[in-house]
Amino acid sequence: MKNLYSEEIMDHFRNPRNMGVINDADAEATIGNPHCGDVMKMYIKVAKRPLSQKLKVKSKKLDKQTENEEYIKDIKFQTLGCGAAIASSSIATELVKGKSLTEALKLTSDEIARRMGKLPPVKYHCSILAEEGIKKVIENYENRRDKNQ
Amino acid sequence: MKRIYLDNAATTPVKPEVFEAMKPYFSRDFGNASSIHSDGQQARATVEQARHEIVEVLNCKDSEVVFTSGGSESDNLAIRGIVESAVGTRRLALGGWQKNPQTADQLPHVITSAFEHHAVLKTVQMLEKSGEIKATYVKPDKEGLIAAEDVKAAIRENTVLVSIMYVNNEIGTIQSIREIGKMLEKLNSARSEASTGRRIYFHCDAIQAAEYLNLDTKYLHVDLMTLSAHKIFGPKGIGLLFMKSGVKITPQITGGEQEWRLRSGTENVAGIVGFAKAMEIIQNAKCKIRNYNSKTEKLRDKLIDGILDRIPKSRLNGSRERRSPANVNVSFFGAEGESILINLDLAGISASSGSACTSGALEPSHVLEAIGVKPEWSHGSVRFSLSPETKEKEIDYLLEELPKIIEKLRKMSPIK
């Protein structure tokens, strides 16, 4: 299998991070469909934390109006798909866990692909699917939150 | 533990006896069979001796076997060669070589099945797309069988070729080649008596049948038949096309006019010797063992029953009764083929899958689609192909490992 997939992919395939279900998730999203072969489901738990905490290091532009930022406290995935689809999901969840929603939305498929080491071109759509999964679950969360406000 | 190889429909290892037989023909007896000197004459004698051994199995004349580089070339030669020859005949009948002398209904018509090997299917599709032929793709039933009457119903006045495989490479279903062959023969004699319509040639890709089934071309009533050595413990890079005397075919590789002027290129002497040796080993074994297939069949059935018993939401693809002794093709709901294969590989087992993700094409298997398997099932398909060398303890080990793998993947899946 060494010639098919990089060590990074095989590592995530064998020991996927954040795999499973969050029963009391704040939002869920399913993308892909069984017809095409890949289905990903993402679950997130969102929490708030003081904004300054993180931005102290990162930026001087402190927005005084919002004292708190929402971040991904926990994230889990379930994936029906090939090795690259499972590894993409695992890597994507690892990359956004603990990040603010704003930061998490910036995750790109390129970044996921880069973390996967050597990703065969025919498998790029897997990293795109993972990016979409993260975006969709955050979008679902925000829609739900805005509706309740 | 030694690795377990259950992908014999993809390729097989060269048997030591085959390798031994081939060895002299690389460095020691290296002659070109077309040369006039002793080295060449010896090579010629070797090639003809090997050919003669093979034609005994095929029950045909020496001049009816053309060696090629393998199955794909044989299939291409059969289809393109027959079509080109038919077009040429037509053009002459119309009074010489003209540009586009044919209207659509005058084009040669080719019938094949919707679940042929790509070497046949893509060749026919390509000729159809480029406007050289009209084509009909006969659908198999849910069991993966082609009905002779469906082939008959597809025949038109301009039909020049029917190409149906003997054993499907993915699902292992055995087609009624003899029945189709006899039907076409009857039709051809009626056509010739009435002087209507064209002679319809019957080509059969018999690659997956060679180890287990009858290859007698007279019994099968075929005009052309493809075989390949590397699926029967012979070397890669050598195959053959049987062509009955009188079949009008245009060569696709031109040059030194080897192989009865039908396939140019210096003969692959070592390959031909290896091919003949591999065929001879099977024939000898069939003489010694009364039912050569039964051992493989038993292991196949054990594997099928074991999987269906131990793994819920699993199904067998293709007819259980009309099935190659070597083929087990199963689908698992909620587990994806490539992921199953990687896990099997990590457990030391080699298999294959009709899943989209393994082909690089992102399309699920055209074979499973043709027999009506829903995509959510075909994505989770795995093919285990056995051989007479497969051991019972290998099947036992697989039956231990596979349920764990499917369970693990199903835990990861959002669709149960």
Image (cartoon, coloured by chain):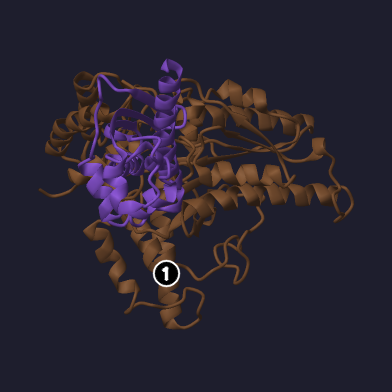
Viewer-proximal residue, B160 or A110?
A110
Residue type of the residue flagged with mark 1: Ala
Q: Position of residue A131 (x, y in %)?
A: 42, 40
The residue at 47%/73% (across/down) is B33
| Towards the viewer: B216 or B295 | B295
Q: Where is residue B297 shown, x and y percent of the image?
A: 25, 30
Residue marked by disc 1: B45
Residue B259 position within the rendered picture, expressed as x and y whole percent measured from the top left: 54, 63
Taking the spot 33% from the left edge, 49% from the top edge, the residue there is B232
Which residue corresponds to the image point at 27% horizontal and 41% vertical from the top-left? Answer: B286
Is B214 rendered above or below residue A110? above
- In the image, residue B375 above or below residue B116: above
| Residue B108 placement: quadrant | top right
Q: Is residue B220 left or right of residue B397?
A: right
Q: Determine if residue B110 is in view.
A: yes
Query: Disc 1 on helix, strand or loop?
Result: helix
Question: Residue extending furthest left?
Answer: B1
Residue B212 appears in the rendering: no
For chain A, the rendered hue is: purple
Q: What is the residue that sits farthest to the bottom in this orientation?
A: B37
B316 left or right of B389 in image? right
Q: Is B185 on the left or on the right of A39, as rendered?
A: right
Q: How many marks?
A: 1
Which colour is chain B painted? brown
Q: Is residue B410 above or below residue B353?
A: above
Q: Residue furthest front?
A: A64
Q: Chain of mark 1?
A: B
Residue extending farthest right: B95
The image position of residue B110, as x and y in percent, is 66, 38
